[in-house]
Image (cartoon, helix red, strand yellow):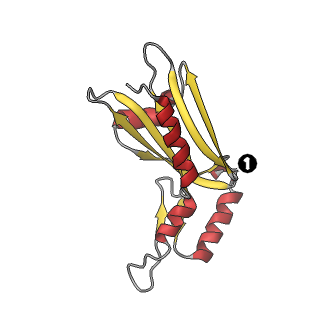
């Protein structure tokens, strides 16, 4: 059981403030007999890092997506989406990676979720050329392209992504 949330606050804040890749970090601690679910999060907002700590009676861990991560006991990625981290504007395309942490009794000790910018993934594939005339792309299970090494094609995909209300 996590007893020192101050250290987790510091980890969350420092991770976001020092990273160009991670635009938000959430640490969720399951409820205990003496308190509700603790949610510690930090996110970048233009030039500042905003930090919050909340205690809920029932919260994020009850969401269907996080329940699927908990039941599978495996880390998971979300479909890319526009985050409102940057000054409340939906201009930052991210994907969230959640990793469940278990204690020695195999009980959920915490869930750590990081919002990763898609620009980072695009940078990863920018120079991968397995064959001379090939392109490299990253897509998710919902057939959304999230990274590709052809800048013109990527800009066309981003434009169609931003114009499609279902994908926003």
Return the residue found at the far top: 34
Q: Residue 82 at what x, y percent from top left?
A: 64, 51
Which residue is at 49% across, 16% downward? 35
Quadrant of the rendered structure where residue 68 is?
A: top left
- Is 153 left or right of 33, judged from the image as shown? right
Instruction: Identify whether 68 is placed above or below 77.
Output: above
- The image quadrant of residue 18 is bottom right
Any part of residue 23 in sight: no
Tell me if 16 is positioned left or right of 84 in this view.
Answer: left
**Residue 53: % across, % down:** 58, 30
Dot 1: few (<14), some (14–19), or many (≥20) neighbours within 10 Å?
few
Please say if 148 is above or below 99: below
42 left or right, relative to 27: right
> Residue shown at 46%/13% (left/top)?
34
User: Under tag 1, what secondary structure?
Assistant: loop
Nearest the viewer among 28 and 1 is 1
Left or right of 144 in this view: 74: left
Q: Position of residue 96 (x, y in %)?
A: 51, 47
Residue 43 visible? The answer is yes
The image shows residue 124, relative to residue 135, as above or below, that is: above
- Residue at 33% over, 33% down: 102
Q: Nearer the viewer, residue 153 or 149?
A: 149
**Which residue is at the far left?**
104
Rendering coords of residue 77 (x, y %)? 46, 48
From the image, tell me which residue sits under label 1: 87
């Amino acid at each position: 059981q996590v007893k020192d949330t101050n250290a987790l606050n510091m980890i969350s804040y420092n991770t976001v403030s020092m990273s160009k890749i991670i635009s938000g970090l959430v640490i969720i601690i399951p409820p205990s007999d003496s308190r509700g679910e603790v949610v510690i999060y930090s996110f970048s907002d233009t030039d500042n890092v905003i930090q919050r700590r909340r205690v809920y009676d029932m919260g994020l861990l009850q969401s269907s997506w996080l329940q699927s991560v908990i039941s599978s006991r495996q880390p998971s990625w979300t479909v890319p989406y526009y985050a409102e981290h940057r000054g409340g504007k939906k201009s930052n395309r991210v994907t969230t990676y959640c990793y469940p942490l278990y204690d020695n009794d195999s009980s959920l000790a915490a869930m750590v979720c990081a919002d990763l910018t898609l620009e980072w993934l695009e940078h990863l594939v920018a120079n991968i050329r397995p064959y001379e005339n090939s392109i490299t792309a990253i897509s998710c299970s919902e057939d959304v392209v999230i990274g590709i090494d052809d800048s013109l094609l990527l800009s066309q995909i981003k434009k169609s992504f931003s114009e499609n209300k279902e994908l926003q």
